[in-house]
Amino acid sequence: MTAPIELDDPRTEDLVVSDTPWITIVWNDPVNLMSYVTFVFQQYFGYPKKRAEKLMMEVHRDGRSTVSNGTREAMERDVQAMHEFGLWATLEKQT
């Protein structure tokens, strides 16, 4: 009679499920005024004026700014909302 084969139990602490959040990026465009972009960030995200202005300046100066992060579904909603406000926005997986 052969001996039973013992299999190692998977170690749950070795299993890592990466739930890397997604981000919403707003891009600079030649159409929208800086004051309007600040207004949108305050209105939609509820950011205080200082934070909205900081993000707007990143868009203006760097050409883009990460304005929110979270699940893919939430970022899809944020991108859609930015489009409805007339801003150029995309989402991507945060690295």
Image (cartoon, rainbow, N blue to C red):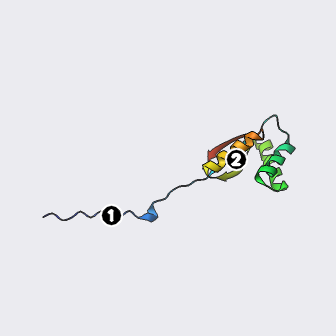
The quadrant the N terminus occupies is: bottom left
In this rendering, position of residue 15 left or right of residue 35: left
Q: Residue at x 73, y 44 (%)?
A: 81
Residue projecting furthest to the top: 30
The foreground one among 83 and 62 is: 83
**x, y percent for residue 74:** 65, 50
**x, y percent for residue 93:** 60, 47
In this rendering, position of residue 48 left or right of residue 95: right
Residue 74 against residue 12 in the figure, above or below: above
Q: Secondary structure at mark 2?
A: helix
Q: Amino acid at mark 1?
A: Asp
Dot 1 or dot 2: first in sequence order is 1
Q: Residue at x 82, y 34 (%)?
A: 31
Q: Amino acid at mark 2?
A: Asp
Residue of label 2: 78
Q: Residue at x 41, y 64 (%)?
A: 11
In this rendering, position of residue 15 left or right of residue 47: left
Q: Residue at x 80, y 46 (%)?
A: 40
Judged by depth in the image, the label closer to the viewer, 1 or 2, is 2
Residue of label 1: 8
The answer to whether residue 94 of the structure is visible from this angle is no
Q: How many marks?
A: 2
Q: Label 1 to label 2, Cα distance in Å?
A: 45 Å
Residue 79 against residue 50 in the figure, above or below: above
**x, y percent for residue 27:** 74, 40
| Quadrant position of residue 28 | top right
